[in-house]
Amino acid sequence: MTGGFRIQLDEVRAGAGGFGVAAEMLSEAGSTLSNALAAQGACWGGDESGQQFSKDYVPAAEGTVKAFSQLSEAIRAIKTALDETANTHQNTDKSTSGGLGAL
C-alpha cells in the first residue's frame, strides 16, 4: 500500500454517535408500538372471523415488534464497531509513534 492510511478519529466517533442515537430512537419506537398493541389487546373478538384475522395478524405484529429490537441491536453493534475502530487506530498510532521515537 502506498501513501499510508489515515482516518479522522473525531469524525469516526461523531458518526458512531449518530448510530447510537438512531438505535435508541428505533428502540423507543419499538417499545411504543409494543405498548400500543398490548393496550389494544385482542380487539378482533373470538368468533370465527376474529380467529381467522388473528392467525395472520398476531404473528405479523409480533414479528414487527421483534424487528424493531433486532434492528436497534444491529445498529448499536455498528456504533460499537466504529468506536472500537477509532480506539484501535488511535492506540496503534500511539504505540507505533512511540516505537519509532526509540530508533
Image: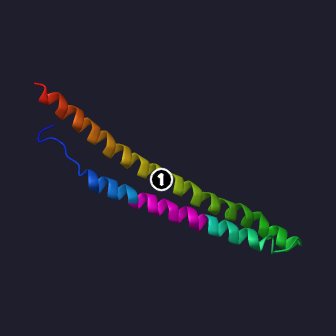
70 lies left or right of 57: left
Compared to residue 40, the image places residue 1 above or below, namely above
The quadrant of the rendering that contains the C terminus is top left
Magenta highlight on residue 89:
no
Magenta-colored span: 18-30
Amino acid type of the residue tagged 1 in the rendering: Arg
Instruction: Name the residue at 46% across, 63% down.
Output: 22
Q: Is residue 93 above or below residue 24?
A: above
Q: How many marks?
A: 1
Residue ranking furthest to the top: 103
Q: Considering depth in this image, is 102 or 90 the residue closer to the camera? A: 102
Locate residue 84, reporting x and y percent. 37, 43
Front residue of 22/41: it is 22
Q: Taken as a whole, is the magenta stretch helix, strand or loop?
A: helix
Q: Position of residue 21 (x, y in %)?
A: 45, 62
**Where does the image place residue 82, in percent across and percent down from the top left?**
37, 49
Q: For the point 43% across and 51% down, which residue is it? A: 78
Within-10-Å neighbours for mark 1: few <14, some 14–19, many 20+: many
